[in-house]
Image (tube, rainbow, N blue to C red):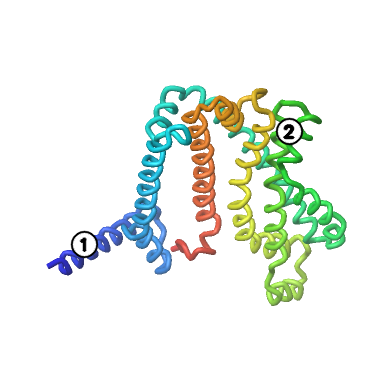
Amino acid sequence: MRKSQKTNLDRSTSDTSALAVQNASSATGRRFSPLATAKLKQNLSWSTWAPAVITFVIAAALWQVTAIANPYVIPTIDQVWLSLINDADTYWKNMLVTGLEVLVGASSGIIAGFILAIIMAEFQIMERAIMPLVVVVMVTPIVAIAPALVVAFGFGMTPKFIVTALVVFFPMLVNSLAGLRDVDDRTLDVMKTLHASRWEIFRDLRFTGSMPYVFAGLRIALPLAIVGAAVAEFVAAGQQAGLGSLVTIAAAQANLPVTWASIALLCLMGVILISMLALVRKRVLWWSDGAAVGR
């Protein structure tokens, strides 16, 4: 009996997934490849997202039990939630400040890293000249650089932009450089045989082929941007707004709900960035994932 019920449930889930795929294909006007159809069915199935839900529920339960047993160490979930509701305006203003730091700093670091990767890929002498200096800067702990930048540029937004850009710069540079150099030799030989210009080789071969590496670098860099912004705010705590400053001030006052609510918002920002990146990647690299194909 149980086996029959399980079979019926699996069949129902499969039918629902198939209907969802059909509706998605009709709505977008695109024909999905068999691989893309299989992936979409898998993403819609209970077995795909149930483990994550169960893990979060268990983690929340353990958190709540620990908080009740140790009220002076961590707050309960309801205390954090009430803090978010009661002081929503304060959290929102500080979240916007941190978001601006991440936006400006990450954009600067990403653009600078990709441009320098292009220069190094095209001119190897530039890599030999610049890469040692880049490595020296990157192996220096950012928590040591941040105070020096605050002293040099003041307690405004500038040092926070620089710290965030530095944290993002290195993974973007390394991944982009690897992608620009990972070209198919046979394709390169064919393009040279056809007298393709250096620009055409870069545009049609190197740039396009580097995109999976670029997105891999972004997946590492974007969460690090939040880390960089928070570290810069820790150093300048009390001088400017930001979730990092809020964490430092609240922790100094032993205000646990505010401390953990700010940390939760920083985590939420990271999840939002990664989710947005995943959506963009599916649009840009549909050919890489075996997604939808043209009609």
Q: Nearer the viewer, mark 2 or mark 1?
A: 2
Q: Does 285 appear above or below 56?
A: below
In the picture, measured across the screen, residue 156 lies left or right of residue 245, that is: right
Specify the quadrant of the image occupied by residue 229.
top right
2 and 1 marks in contact (CB < 8 Å): no
Q: Earlier in the sequence, mark 2 or mark 1?
A: 1
Q: Secondary structure at mark 2?
A: helix
Point out residue 53 in the picture as x, y percentages from the top left corner: 36, 51
> Where the N terminus falls, by quadrant?
bottom left
In the picture, measured across the screen, residue 158 lies left or right of residue 133, that is: left
> Where the C terminus falls, by quadrant?
bottom left
Nearer to the camera, 136 or 270: 136
Q: Does 20 appear above or below 79?
A: below
Question: How far is disc 2 from disc 1 in space, using C-alphas?
Answer: 57 Å
Nearer to the camera, 61 or 120: 61
| Amino acid on which the number 2 mark rests in the picture | Pro
| Amino acid on which the number 1 mark rests in the picture | Leu
**Residue 96 is at least partly visible in this image:** no
Q: Secondary structure at mark 1?
A: helix
Residue at the spot of label 2: 159
Label 2 Cα crowd, 10 Å radius (few <14 / some 14-19 / many 20+): many
**Residue 214 is at least partly visible in this image:** yes
Q: Residue at x 50, y 55 (%)?
A: 282
The numbered disc on residue 9 is 1
Q: Does 136 appear above or below 244?
A: below
Q: Residue at x 81, y 30 (%)?
A: 152
Point out residue 237 in the picture as x, y percentages from the top left corner: 65, 27
In the picture, measured across the screen, residue 283 lies left or right of residue 52, that is: right
Point out residue 174 in the picture as x, y percentages from the top left corner: 71, 57
